[in-house]
Amino acid sequence: MLIYGLGLLAFSYLAGQLFGDFLGEVIGVQANVGGVGFAMLLLVLLHNYFQKKHWVKSNFDEGIGFWSNMYIPVIVAMSASQNALLAFNHGILPIIAGTLIVIIGFALVPLISSIKTTHS
Amino acid sequence: MNIISFFEKNGMITSFLFIAIIMLIADQISTRLLRKKIPGSAIAILLGLLLAYYGGMITGGEKGIADFPLFSGFKLVGGSMFRDFCIVSTALGVSFPVMIQAGKAGIISLALGLVVSFVVGICVGLAFGYQDAESLATIGAGTLTFIVGPVTGSALGASSDVIALSVATGVVKAIVVTVFTPLVATKIKLDNPHAAMVFGGLIGTTSGVAAGLAATDQKLVPYGALTATFYTGLGCLLCPSVFYLALKAMI
């Protein structure tokens, strides 16, 4: 059943985010710490367990797969509701700082990525 | 009968329709005008940003196109709940061995991403004549993400225009990442899960990483999200405390 897949996804999302909020509270910050990551981990583990138990039947996975296919449309909606104007009407400092850090970040990607190859 | 309030009442469904139209236009531009040199999803995200700019210009609001009643559903569908739900759903494609192999590089990139962003923000702040540790730390925090900036600024009691600067810096970062990631992806070898995890840790801003990877290769999204999800929370932890104290000791 499709709704069971969706239910598993919803459970993983809620449990992960709740734990992320909890963790944020424990270390005393006004933000979620790793909620999405915990949710992803939980989803993978539970899905594996469900498969072993033969509970993943017929279109169970479609309830999850639909949402991963909705990813790009949701991101399009996200970019359309960004405060894009704000980025350009606060003078030059945000533009310089925001651009500079991305250039540096991009440049570091191949450097840090090579850490695997030298150690394994 | 007021047709606008009808669409507003059915906001979420209306936004599905408009997103479909945006994606259709983007795919047509990609195949017919650009011979698929730039993927349709990248163009759709770019069109979204242009709409957001237009919406902000006309309405003066903070939610881009979603401030028009007709497009109010974009607030929900483009909000963090749907975004994170979709990111989590991509996790089933994740390979554990790859994730563990990239774990070390992921953690290093996360630590480096936080420190380097903060330092770059401070350097730019200094260049613009800011000298007090509170303002500099707030600008540095804004260079992490547009959430860390205001959290740090209000914790340290920075002035409201410095906080506004820090938010703007974070938004610029997210937009620059979104637009340029697909263009530089091959040059920085961002074509495998390992590099995507490093990328997520170094860049960190969830909206930028999510949109940038979506426009590059959707398979990389869960890996980038895995490290980026810790970035904002850790930033909110470190910027007003350890980073701020270290900065204050140096000034």
Image: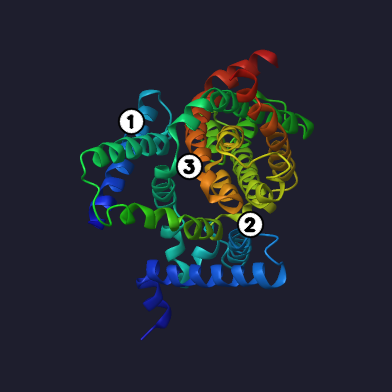
Q: Residue furthest top?
A: B249
Mark 3 vs mark 1, CA separation in Å: 22 Å
**Where residue A22 is drawn, which disc sits there?**
1
Out of A83 and A115, give the one closest to the viewer: A115
Task: Compute the Cα span from label 2 to label 1.
Answer: 34 Å
Q: Type of residue at label 1?
A: Phe
Q: Mark on residue A114?
A: none
Instruction: Work out whether residue B204 or residue A45 is closer to the camera in this orientation and state it.
Output: A45
User: Do discs 3 and 2 belong to a common subunit?
Assistant: no
Packing grade of label 1 (10 A; few <14, some 14-19, many >=20) is: some
Disc 3 is placed on an element classified as: helix
Numbered disc in front, either 3 or 2: 3
Residue sitting at x 49%, y 60%: A73
* Image coords of residue B29 (percent x, y): 66, 70
- Above-or-below relation of A113 to B187: above
Q: Please state, as top left, top right, bottom left or bottom right, where the C terminus of chain B lies in the image.
A: top right
Given the image, what chain letter belongs to the residue carrying mark 3?
B
Same subunit, tags 2 and 1: yes
Which residue corresponds to mark 3? B222
- Provide residue B207's location: percent of width, then percent of height: 54, 47
Taking depth in this image into account, of B228 and B123 the one nearest to the observer is B228
Count the labels in the image: 3
Q: Which mark, by number, is residue A85? A: 2
Asked which quadrant contains residue A25, the reply is top left
Does the image show residue B113? Answer: yes
The image shows residue B41, relative to residue A37, as above or below, that is below
Residue B65 picture quarter = bottom right
Q: Is B196 placed left or right of B93 in the picture? A: right
Separation of disc 3 and disc 2 at Cα? Answer: 29 Å
Three-letter amino acid code of the residue under disc 3: Pro
